[in-house]
Image (tube, helix red, strand yellow):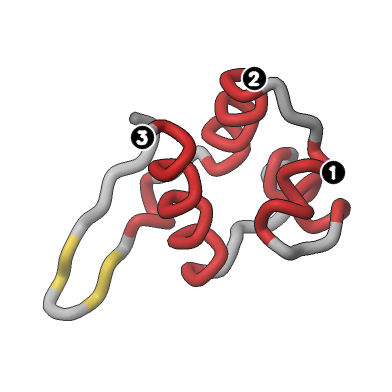
Amino acid sequence: MRCRLIHIGNYELEYLYCDYGGVIKAFKQEHGLKTSDVAKYLGVDYHTVLSWERGKRKPIYTYWKNFYIKNLKLKC
């Protein structure tokens, strides 16, 4: 796993240690998806996912949490 979840008090600091683009790219490859598929899957714009993949932006916690929840459902 490329992400590490660190708890400091009540805060989760996953974003400090995460390669979001790498995780998204690996997810796409594993499931045979395109960037547009992931965007639709998460309910965000295509360019938003593209900027996450390229490392220009980081997803807010809500989207990242939804990504993991939906990813786990696909694997089960």
Residue farthest bottom in this picture: 10
Which one is earlier in the sequence, the residue at label 2 or at label 1?
2
- The residue lying at 77 percent from left, 50 percent from top is 51
Residue 64: image location, x then y, percent:
50, 58
On the rendered image, what quadrant is the N terminus found in?
A: top left
Instruction: Give the residue at mark 1.
Output: 36
**Residues at marks 3 and 2 touching, judged by CB atoms closer than 8 Å:** no
User: Relative to 27, is 74 on the left or the right?
Assistant: left
Question: Quadrant of the rendered structure where residue 48 is?
Answer: bottom right
Label of residue 53 in the image: none
Circle 1 or circle 3, nearest the eye: 3
Instruction: Give the residue at mark 3.
Output: 76
**Residues at marks 2 and 1 touching, judged by CB atoms closer than 8 Å:** no
Residue farthest front in this picture: 76
Give the alpha-carbon distance from disc 2 to disc 1, as whole Å: 13 Å
- The residue lying at 47 percent from left, 68 percent from top is 61
Give whichever of 35, 21 is nearer the camera: 35
Residue 23: image location, x then y, percent:
53, 34
Give the alpha-carbon distance from disc 1 to disc 3, as whole Å: 23 Å
Which one is earlier in the sequence, the residue at label 3 or at label 2?
2
Residue 25: image location, x then y, percent:
64, 28
Secondary structure beneath dot 1 equals helix
Which one is earlier in the sequence, the residue at label 1 or at label 3?
1
Amino acid type at mark 2: Gln
Instruction: Give the residue at mark 2.
Output: 29
